[in-house]
């Protein structure tokens, strides 16, 4: 015989599922672990129920509430609650919620040209609320922007963003950002810092080895079937012992130097100022550095002062046996002059990852086996994207918690 003692007391709170016949709450069965559910205003539980879930657009009127004298909470399952008599709820001291959970993630604009996406962008949404249009309503209140790749940040861009206080660059060079205008408007700017430096330095060395030892050209020689016909391929030259002139001894330049010292090269450098802690010989101008170098590795920032820093005079000083590697920006080199020097055999060769008018590359270079061409990808490795992502997140987190920025832009 069953007795009352056999019954397990049910402590789950009572909840009314209030719904029009045509509306069901999705996944309603998940609720029964936590709540005792019923769904009729005519049920005996109606007089004591304290909470109601309003499914979809089911009306909650004064008449509904008259059936529920103990009600203290209406849980809406939609964002808009025009079907709930909010004034009547307020009058009766009944709280109302909708399905919008408050989002405390700071707002960040991903500013990008259509052809440039931020690698690993999906990692950011854990921390930030992202949007990507200057025309969006969020633009007026956003305080931080991530500038993807070479997307320009001009005075006009900034005019759309009156609350902006931080531009987070995703590259080491920020020649596409109007830094003076940012400064004038009190907007801080960060760069990729040294997240990419080792990758870029590796690539500079790869280009240099390739040009000197003719690796890509030899590969073409084999693939085109010329080896059996012609036999020996022209000799390349040794890297060890070369005098390397580094133009811009910042984070990338220093990594290049480290690597080339290991190849038993000698290193000298040019930068805006002599670095007191650096022992490599310093040349105050690039021309003198070129006179005393076999190879120039160009890796400084592009500014008004460094535009065409490698000009006709410098190329002449580098000479017929000289080589040039550019992993900085195309416009650091006077490209027309460089093409002339290469075509006429006035310098030994070049390894170029960057060009003045990317993605357009002077066609004259295609025929030259002493030139290695690459589509601006010195930074591009998964490791570098990981590191870049961390720097971006760290800068944004520091900014939104008023801490010092991790990699404020500093010009080399
Ligand atoms: O070009 C790439 C960079 O500036 O990081």
Image: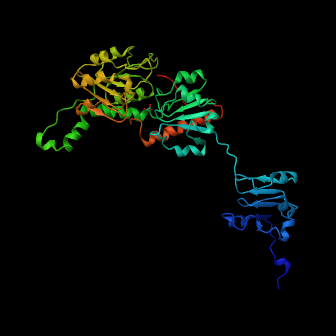
Q: Position of residue 193 (x, y in %)?
A: 50, 31
Q: Residue at x 75, y 64 (%)?
A: 17
* Residue 405 visible, this orientation: no
The residue under the point 72% across, 67% down is 32
Q: Is 232 displayed left or right of 165 in the figure?
A: left
The correct choice, above or below, for 320 with respect to 80 in the image is above
Q: Is residue 296 left or right of residue 25?
A: left
Answer with the quarter of the image where residue 330 lies.
Answer: top left
Q: How many marks?
A: 0
Compared with 274, 169 (above or below) is below
- Residue 349 is situated, as x and y percent measured from the top left of the image, at 26, 27
Q: Nearer the viewer, residue 384 or 134?
A: 134
Q: Is residue 194 above or below residue 321?
A: below
Q: Nearer the viewer, residue 176 or 397?
A: 176
- Quadrant including the N terminus: bottom right
Q: What residue lies at 27% left-to-right and 31% top-to-bottom?
A: 363
């Amino acid at each position: 015989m069953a007795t009352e003692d056999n019954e397990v007391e049910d402590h789950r709170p009572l909840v009314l599922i209030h719904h029009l016949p045509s509306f069901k709450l999705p996944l309603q069965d998940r609720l029964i672990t936590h709540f005792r559910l019923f769904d009729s205003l005519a049920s005996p539980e109606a007089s004591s129920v304290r909470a109601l879930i309003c499914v979809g657009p089911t009306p909650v009127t004064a008449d509904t509430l008259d059936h529920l004298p103990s009600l203290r909470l209406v849980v809406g399952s939609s964002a808009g609650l025009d079907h709930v008599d909010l004034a009547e709820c307020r009058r009766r001291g009944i709280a109302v919620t909708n399905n919008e959970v408050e989002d405390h993630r700071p707002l960040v604009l991903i500013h990008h040209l259509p052809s440039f996406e931020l690698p690993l962008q999906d990692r950011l949404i854990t921390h930030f609320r992202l949007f990507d249009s200057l025309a969006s309503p969020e633009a007026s209140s956003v305080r931080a922007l991530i500038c993807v790749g070479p997307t320009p940040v001009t005075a006009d861009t900034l005019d759309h963003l009156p609350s902006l206080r931080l531009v987070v660059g995703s590259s080491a060079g920020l020649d596409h950002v109007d830094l003076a205008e940012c400064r004038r408007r009190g907007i801080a700017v960060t760069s990729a810092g040294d997240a990419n430096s080792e990758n870029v330095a590796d690539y500079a060395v790869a280009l240099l080895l390739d040009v000197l030892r003719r690796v890509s050209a030899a590969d073409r020689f084999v693939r085109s079937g010329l080896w059996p016909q012609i036999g020996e391929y022209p000799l390349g030259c040794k890297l060890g012992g070369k005098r390397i002139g580094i133009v811009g001894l910042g984070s990338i330049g220093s990594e290049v130097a480290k690597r080339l010292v290991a190849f038993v090269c000698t290193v000298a450098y040019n930068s805006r100022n002599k670095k007191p802690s650096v022992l490599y010989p310093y040349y105050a101008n690039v021309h003198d550095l070129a006179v005393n170098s076999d190879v120039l590795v160009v890796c400084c920032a592009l500014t008004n002062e460094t535009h065409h820093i490698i000009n006709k005079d410098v190329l002449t000083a580098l000479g017929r046996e000289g080589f040039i590697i550019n992993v900085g920006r195309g416009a650091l080199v006077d490209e027309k002059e460089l093409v002339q020097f290469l075509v006429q055999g006035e310098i030994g060769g070049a390894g170029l990852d960057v060009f003045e008018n990317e993605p357009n590359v002077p066609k004259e270079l295609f025929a030259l086996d002493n030139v290695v061409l690459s589509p601006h990808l010195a930074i591009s490795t998964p490791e570098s994207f990981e590191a870049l992502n961390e720097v971006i997140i760290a800068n944004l987190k520091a900014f939104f918690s008023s801490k010092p920025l991790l990699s404020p832009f500093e010009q080399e």
